[in-house]
Image: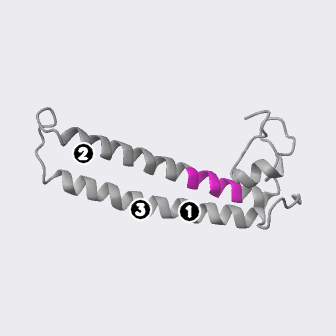
Amino acid sequence: MTLPESGTASPRQRIAAERAEAAHRIDFLTTRLDEIIEGSHLTTADDEHDPEGATVAFERAQTASLLAEARRDLDELVEAERRLDAGTYGMCEKCGRPISAERLEVLPAARRCIDCA
């Protein structure tokens, strides 16, 4: 299937750019989470009485959540690339109709058209 180009980048280029961004976020967030965990060993374990304890716990949970999201994004982009290789990229997995080029430009890993999303 040949998709009309709505921008200057091809679907493969957009997917590659998004994959690189997701990989960068994973690297950054992994380092950040490691720093938070390492730093938490230097503070008291008594979150109830330590005004900074809740902040450390919140930062750790927030960073872990962002890291999980970045990993999901990367997995979705890998799947989008597989669909591109298989010739099914740009087709809605629910209704089988084409996903608009505009939607794919903004969300290169989109699996469903806007009506089915």
**Quadrant in the picture for the C terminus:** top right
| Element at label 3 | helix
Q: Earlier in the sequence, mark 1 or mark 2?
A: 1
Q: Earlier in the sequence, mark 3 or mark 2?
A: 3
Q: Which residue is mark 3?
A: 28
| Residue that label 1 marks | 21
Q: Give amino acid for label 3.
A: Phe
Q: Circle 1 — which element?
A: helix
- Count of marks placed on residues: 3
Locate residue 54, reporting x and y percent.
23, 38
Residue located 57% across and 55% down the image: 74
The residues tagged by marks 3 and 1 sit, at their Cα atoms, a distance apart of 11 Å
Secondary structure mostly seen in magenta is: helix
Q: Amino acid at mark 1?
A: Glu
* Earlier-in-chain disc, 3 versus 1: 1
Q: Position of residue 10 (x, y in %)?
A: 78, 65
Residue lying farthest to the front in this orientation: 51
- Judge the density around disc 1: few (<14), some (14-19), many (≥20) Cα neighbours within 10 Å: some
* Magenta part of the chain: 73-81
Identify the residue shown where x is 82% and y is 52%: 101
User: Label 2 belongs to which residue?
Assistant: 56
